[in-house]
Each structure stands twice: as structure tokens, then as C-alpha cells.
């Protein structure tokens, strides 16, 4: 397995839209393994293929404290959603920035697993927020883009300053 480079906001490649995976192959599983390793190493609770510069609809998530409950969603679709909840989100592509967003509280998602089998997942709480956040990445959307223009420009300035200081 390998640790992949995570694109950093405002990299334009984060806005590219992912395509459905046509067939789940050994190469797909290799990519998923690398994505999981990259997420755990960061460390983070979720990673979308878009963030490692791959335009395929693949997400890895693990919200467990023990990092041993990997959820893989290939070609995820939201079938139903209900409720609303405000939760603070962060993103491996936007380091050090945490902002509260409103999202659906409960969702039903259909996806393929690593064997290419279809399954349905009922998610709520942090997991539901995470799935929605990562699915946004597949559509080319980064969570800070829900914020006001003023907040977004402040965030870009903060990230640029941080990058200059650490280069
Ligand atoms: Ni993210």
C-alpha cells in the first residue's frame, strides 16, 4: 500500500466531478487500500478519491476510535434523507479549518462494496454527516464552499499564510 498525496484547497482539481466506477477490479481495490492508508495516516475520518486526484466515485470512511471499522462506498447514491443537524466539519484538503454546517440528520445510501456487490446503508449522526461531506467531494464540492464569500476568502488567506510559513 502507499500513502497518496492529498490535494489542498483551493486546488482546482478538487472541483472536478468523479465518474461512476464501471467495474470493481483488483486495481480499484488497490486504490481503496491506498486511500484507507492515506486517511489513517493523516489522520482523518473520511477521504474521497477526488482528494487524491482520481476522478472515480469512491469513498473511504472510518469514524471508529480504534481505526478498524472501514466503510467503503463505491458509486454511492442517497436514496432518502430526513431531518437536519448542525455539526462542525473539517477536511483533509482544508487543514486546520473547522466550520459548522447543516446537513440531513439521517440518510439511506446505496453503494457497491469492494466486491462490486450492491448494499444499502442507513446512517445517522457523525456517519451521516461524513457520507454527505465525502459525496460532495465526488461532485467537486468542498465543504467551505457552503460558507459566505467573506468566510471563504478569510479561509484562503489563512491557508496561504500557513503554507508560506511551512515552506
Ligand atoms: Ni473533505
Image (spheres, rainbow, N blue to C red):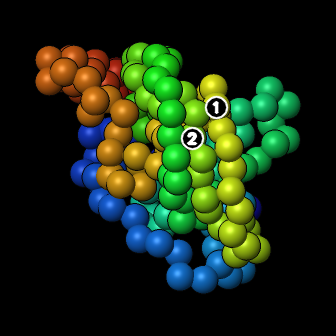
Vertical relation: 115 (above or below) 63: below
Q: Position of residue 42 (x, y in %)?
A: 62, 36
* Residue 112 percent across, percent down from the top left: 65, 67
- Real-space Cα separation, disc 2 to disc 1, in angstroms: 6 Å
Q: Name the residue nearer the viewer: 20 or 13.
A: 20
The mark total stands at 2
Q: Is mark 1 within 8 Å of ligand 1?
A: no
**Which quadrant does the N terminus fall into?**
bottom right
Instruction: Say left or right for 108 vs 83.
Output: right
Q: Position of residue 137 (x, y in %)?
A: 41, 48
Q: Which residue is mark 1?
A: 124
Q: Earlier in the sequence, mark 2 or mark 1?
A: 2
In the image, residue 153 sits, relative to residue 75, either above or below, namely: above
- Callout 2 secondary element: strand
Front residue of this view, candidates 162 and 30: 30
The image quarter containing residue 2 is bottom right
Which mark, residue 107?
2
Residue in view at x 47 percent, y 49 percent: 135
Looking at the image, which residue is at 71% across and 33% down? 63
Residue beneath the point at 69% across and 50% down: 121
Mark 1 crowd level (few <14, some 14–19, many ≥20, 10 Å Cα): some
Contact check, label 2 and label 1, Cβ < 8 Å: yes
Question: Is any atom of residue 65 visible in this view?
Answer: yes
User: Which quadrant of the rendered structure holds the C terminus?
Assistant: top left
Is residue 36 something that shows in the picture?
A: no
Q: Is residue 87 left or right of residue 120?
A: left
**What number is the disc on residue 73?**
none
Amino acid at each position: 500500500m502507499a500513502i497518496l498525496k492529498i490535494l489542498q484547497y483551493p486546488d482546482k482539481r478538487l472541483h472536478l466531478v468523479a465518474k461512476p466506477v464501471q467495474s470493481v477490479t483488483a486495481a480499484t481495490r488497490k486504490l481503496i487500500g491506498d486511500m484507507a492508508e492515506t486517511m489513517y495516516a493523516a489522520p482523518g475520518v473520511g477521504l474521497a478519491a477526488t482528494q487524491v486526484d482520481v476522478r472515480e466515485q469512491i469513498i473511504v470512511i472510518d469514524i471508529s476510535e480504534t481505526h478498524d471499522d472501514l466503510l467503503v462506498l463505491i458509486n454511492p447514491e442517497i436514496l432518502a434523507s430526513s431531518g437536519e443537524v448542525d455539526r462542525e466539519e473539517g477536511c483533509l484538503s482544508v487543514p486546520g479549518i473547522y466550520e459548522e454546517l447543516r446537513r440531513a440528520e439521517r440518510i439511506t445510501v446505496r453503494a457497491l462494496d469492494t466486491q462490486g456487490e450492491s448494499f444499502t446503508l442507513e446512517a445517522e449522526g457523525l456517519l451521516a454527516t461524513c457520507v454527505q461531506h465525502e459525496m460532495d467531494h465526488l461532485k467537486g464540492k468542498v465543504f467551505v464552499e457552503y460558507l459566505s464569500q467573506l468566510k471563504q476568502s478569510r479561509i484562503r488567506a489563512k491557508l496561504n499564510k500557513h503554507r508560506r510559513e511551512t515552506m
